[in-house]
């Protein structure tokens, strides 16, 4: 089953795609504008690992998250802060592990191919 939720963000509209089935996961794509107008976050529900939420470029570092720091190069600071609130609510609601991709300490703990998360 595929559910599409369209969000009107002024001049542009973005799609949130929820609950499309993969062999071992459900995936939600969420609109998180601010870094760029079309920035999105991907929430992946894995059977054995649990929910994982890569931050994309919403947070570049753990410090960015703690301080709610908005980079000067982001397209819209207010949208970035609203997306930070949105992603924090999503983490609280789902118990997802936030993976901040630019975080070297996290990267050093992750399993690398050919290992996989399921």
Image: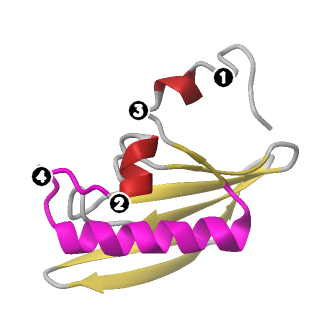
**Residue 65, position in %: x, y?**
42, 53
Q: Main secondary structure of the magenta part?
A: helix
Q: Are marks 2 and 1 in contact (CB under 8 Å)?
A: no
Q: CA distance from mark 2 to mark 3?
A: 16 Å
The stretch of residues the image draws in magenta is: 69-96
Which is in the foreground here, disc 2 or disc 3?
A: 2
Q: CA distance from mark 2 to mark 1?
A: 24 Å
Question: Which is nearer the N-term, disc 4 or disc 1?
Answer: 4
Which residue was labeled with disc 4?
72
Residue 27's place in the image compared with 105, above or below, is below
Give the SS element for disc 2: loop
Front in this rendered view, residue 47 or 2: 47
Question: Which is nearer the N-term, disc 1 or disc 3?
Answer: 3
Q: Quadrant of residue 10?
A: bottom left
Which is in the foreground here, disc 4 or disc 2?
A: 2
Question: Which is nearer the N-term, disc 3 or disc 4?
Answer: 4
Which residue was labeled with disc 2?
68
**Residue 39, position in %: x, y?**
31, 58
Front in this rendered view, residue 35 or 62: 62
Which residue was labeled with disc 3?
102
Tell me if mark 1 has few (under 14), some (14-19) or many (20+) residues whose alpha carbon lies within 10 angstroms of its own. Answer: few
Q: Are marks 4 and 1 in contact (CB under 8 Å)?
A: no
Which residue was labeled with disc 1?
109
Side of 51 where 53 appears, left or right: left
**Residue 112, position in %: x, y?**
65, 17
């Amino acid at each position: 089953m595929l559910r599409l939720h369209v969000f009107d963000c002024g001049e542009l509209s973005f799609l949130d795609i929820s609950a499309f089935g993969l062999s071992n996961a459900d995936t939600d794509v969420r609109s998180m504008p601010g870094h760029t107008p079309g920035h999105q976050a991907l929430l992946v529900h894995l059977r054995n690992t649990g929910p994982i939420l890569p931050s994309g470029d919403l947070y570049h570092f753990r410090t960015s998250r703690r301080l709610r720091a908005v980079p000067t190069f982001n397209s819209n600071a207010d949208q970035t802060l609203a997306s930070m609130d949105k992603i924090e609510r999503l983490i609280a609601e789902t118990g997802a592990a936030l993976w901040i991709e630019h975080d070297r300490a996290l990267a050093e703990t992750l399993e690398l191919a050919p290992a996989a998360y399921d």
